[in-house]
Image (spheres, rainbow, N blue to C red):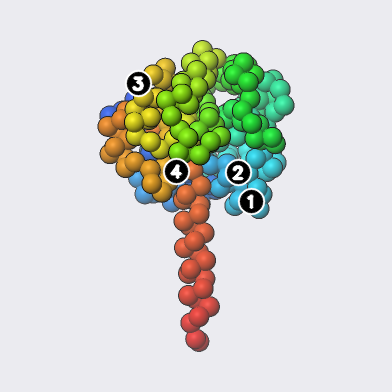
């Protein structure tokens, strides 16, 4: 697959195809290898799944050193590009976020997610605050010489129930997207948004390729492609499905008489 820079270039190009880049989120080297063997074009971690697999709750409760070690082992597990979910960047300051991103690059990542909600309080950060954090993320990538794909996640749509999602909320997300693009972000991730009309409006107005997260009730991949979505994530869904299958198989095995 080539060098880290080569992988970063490939990963970036996957956001510009006719079909969305599908990321079936993995959580450790074994799951990354299974996803790769299924024909995936890239590997993405999901913070919730990684934390759960290591016995932690989500929200930057998993130690950063452990998260980066897990990332490094996933990078060597397959030849595919790997992007990492860094949650809010594991830092109270923008400079600390830059250091976290530098650590992820050193571990082999070619992309990262950075969200704009506070891990403790759960509220949205001020736009200027989050933009400053993205500036430092981009600076870390530039210093490392790796064209990291910085996926700026906004939690605007996670702050209210789906029935409250409307055009005004889309405009709030677009306001953040424009600021994040100016700060050096490469993609806009909008988990929680599933309404087709609102997705279409957001895609048309976004200065960045749009990433949605799918789950029960979400539009089909074909519909998302028609709406212009560039990237589709599965979040904790793959981990939850795997654990459900494991529990069922265990119960069946225990019920078998010798």
SS at mark 4 in the image = loop
Q: Which residue is mark 2?
A: 70
Q: Which residue is mark 3?
A: 204
Q: CA distance from mark 1 to mark 3?
A: 39 Å
Looking at the image, can residue 112 be seen? no
Looking at the image, can residue 223 be seen? yes
Which residue is depicted at the point 65% across and 40% down?
59
Q: Which residue is mark 4?
A: 234
Q: Is residue 138 above or below residue 151?
A: above
Whether tag 1 and tag 2 are in contact, CB under 8 A, the answer is yes
Of the numbered discs 4 and 2, the one sitting upstream in the chain is: 2
Whether tag 2 and tag 3 are in contact, CB under 8 A, the answer is no
Q: Is residue 130 rendered to the left or right of residue 76?
A: right
Q: Which residue is mark 1?
A: 54
Residue 176 position within the rendered picture, expressed as x and y whole percent measured from the top left = 52, 20
Residue 178 position within the rendered picture, expressed as x and y whole percent measured from the top left = 48, 16
């Amino acid at each position: 697959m080539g060098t880290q820079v080569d992988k970063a270039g490939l990963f970036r190009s996957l956001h510009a195809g006719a079909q969305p880049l599908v990321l079936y989120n993995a959580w450790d080297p074994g799951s990354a290898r299974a996803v790769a063997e299924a024909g995936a074009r890239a590997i993405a971690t999901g913070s919730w799944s990684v934390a759960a697999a290591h016995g932690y709750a989500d929200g930057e409760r998993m130690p950063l050193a452990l998260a980066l070690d897990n990332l490094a082992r996933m990078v060597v597990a397959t030849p595919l590009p790997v992007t990492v979910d860094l949650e809010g960047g594991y830092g109270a300051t923008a400079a600390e976020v830059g250091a976290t991103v530098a650590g992820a690059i050193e571990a082999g990542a070619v992309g990262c997610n950075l969200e704009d909600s506070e891990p403790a309080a759960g509220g949205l950060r001020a736009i200027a605050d989050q933009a400053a954090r993205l500036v430092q993320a981009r600076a870390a990538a530039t210093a490392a010489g790796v064209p990291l794909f910085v996926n700026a996640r906004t939690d605007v749509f996670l702050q209210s129930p789906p029935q409250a999602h409307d055009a005004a909320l889309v405009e709030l997300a677009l306001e953040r997207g424009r600021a994040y693009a100016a700060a050096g972000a490469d993609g806009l991730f909008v988990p929680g948004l599933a309404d087709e009309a609102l997705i279409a409006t957001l895609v048309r107005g976004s200065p960045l390729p749009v990433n949605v997260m799918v789950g029960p009730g979400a539009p089909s991949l074909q519909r998302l492609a028609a709406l212009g979505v560039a990237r589709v994530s599965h979040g904790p869904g793959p981990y939850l499905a795997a654990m459900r299958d494991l529990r069922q198989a265990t119960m069946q095995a225990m019920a078998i008489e010798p």
